[in-house]
Image (spheres, rainbow, N blue to C red):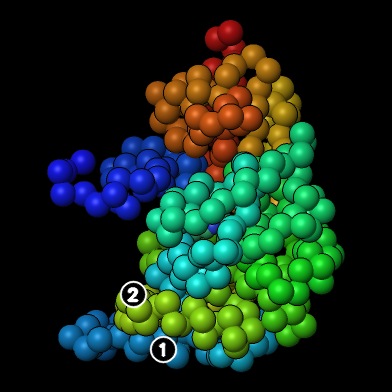
Amino acid sequence: MSRWISQEAERLAPYTPGEQPQDQQYVKLNTNESPFPPSPKVLKAINRAEILKLNLYSDPTCAALTEAIARRYELKAKNVLAGNGSDEVLAFAFRAFCGAGQPVAFADVTYGFYKSQAALFDLDVKIIPLREDFTLHVDDYMDFPGTIVIANPNAPTGIAVPRNDIQRLLEANPDRVVIVDEAYVDFGAESCVPMIYRYDNLLVTQTMSKSRSLAGGRVGYALGSPELIADLNRVKYSFHPYNVNRLSIAAGAAAVADEAYFAACTAAIRQTRAWTVGELENLGFTVLPSQANFVFARHSQLPGETLYRKLKENGVLVRWFDADRIRDYIRITIGSMEQMETLVEELTAILEEL
Ligand SMILES: *Cc1c(COP(=O)(O)O)cnc(C)c1O
């Protein structure tokens, strides 16, 4: 740190992203990207005409994108805010709905970025531990006097909370905002989006990074009541009015309109997930029940760190977290069938060495 750093910046807790090696030498199963390219419609949308307009600022309202998203979810554009990835949307939400007298609660084992955002905005945080089996019980959040953030399905466990449970939480806490981070919802969990018209304290965030093959495009969005969306815009226009670039607006709008491609990709991932879980269990792994495009697994014979390291030596990247409760586990992204076959071959070889 330099001698000029502010006290506020000194106190930050920056998020550590998964490795992004820039050569193609790994089977990359560590950051939950899609193994499939973006929809062919995205390629058509990012065309020469669009590139030639890069001298002009992008639309600050992201109208083409928010309207396409609104159509897909049967909402109005005023129910949608688009962001430069859902990480940015989450940051707007943390700033908008948490602060002095408005603490934030989230699970002990969840998306690591919540902690980073809370530190950035200097928030009071209540960590609510998951149960022994890593399930989240909304009853543990009922008395919390502040904003609640739930990743559903959760990361890195993959475990989902039923929509009815979230509904109970919304009803018990009409004066508090509940943020449901649905980054992985398209791989099998129940979305809370259908409840947006009924509960004005519900904010759902989603991303095109996982189920729509646009991680590098950085497109995320929040869905909620017009009042919540207006509050998010207040933060956005205080931070970065042109937050989504021109090419990403076009890419996102095209991706969200291609329902057939989306359905095919997410179905393939679910099928490959089922196959992978079976293979891992045959190899003696314990696998948590996942509704996401990754699985969280541990092996009785080898610690998580060793599995991670040995896989990496053999060209397969997975994610290992050096954190309480989950040190024994590795998180494996569900890639293409071919990638998962390679993973299983390498794991088989590693376990045979024992
Ligand atoms: C990947 C992820 C996000 C953020 O994705 P973006 O790429 O910023 O849209 C948000 N929440 C969870 C739980 C994630 O895993």
Q: Residue at x 51, y 64 (%)?
A: 99
Calculate the distance from the C-alpha at mark 2 to the C-alpha at mark 1. Answer: 14 Å
- Residue 23 in the image: x percent, y percent? 28, 43
| Disc number lying in front (2 or 1) | 2
Compared across the picture, whether 344 is left or right of 137 comes to left
Is residue 171 at all visible to an observer of this figure? yes
Q: Secondary structure at mark 2?
A: helix
* Amino acid type assigned to the residue bearing label 1 in the image: Thr
- Residue 93 in the image: x percent, y percent? 52, 69
**Residue 252 appears in which quarter of the rendering?**
bottom left
- Figure check: 151 above or below 158: below
Label located before the other in sequence (2 or 1): 1
**The N terminus is located in which quarter?**
top left
- Residue 89 in the image: x percent, y percent? 48, 69
Q: Which residue is mark 2?
A: 239
Compared across the picture, whether 267 is left or right of 321 comes to right
Q: How many residues crowd mark 2 within 10 Å: few (<14), some (14–19), many (20+)?
A: few
Q: Secondary structure at mark 1?
A: loop
* Amino acid type assigned to the residue bearing label 2 in the image: Phe
Q: Residue at x 77, y 34 (%)?
A: 132
**Residue 103 appears in which quarter of the rendering?**
bottom right
**The C terminus is located in which quarter?**
top right
Q: Which residue is mark 1?
A: 61
Compared across the picture, whether 279 is left or right of 65 comes to right
Residue furthest to the top in view is 354
Viewer-nearest residue: 317 or 243: 243
**Residue 226 appears in which quarter of the rendering?**
bottom right
Viewer-nearest residue: 152 or 116: 116
Viewer-nearest residue: 230 or 247: 230
- Figure check: 243 above or below 306: below
- Residue 333 in the image: x percent, y percent? 55, 44
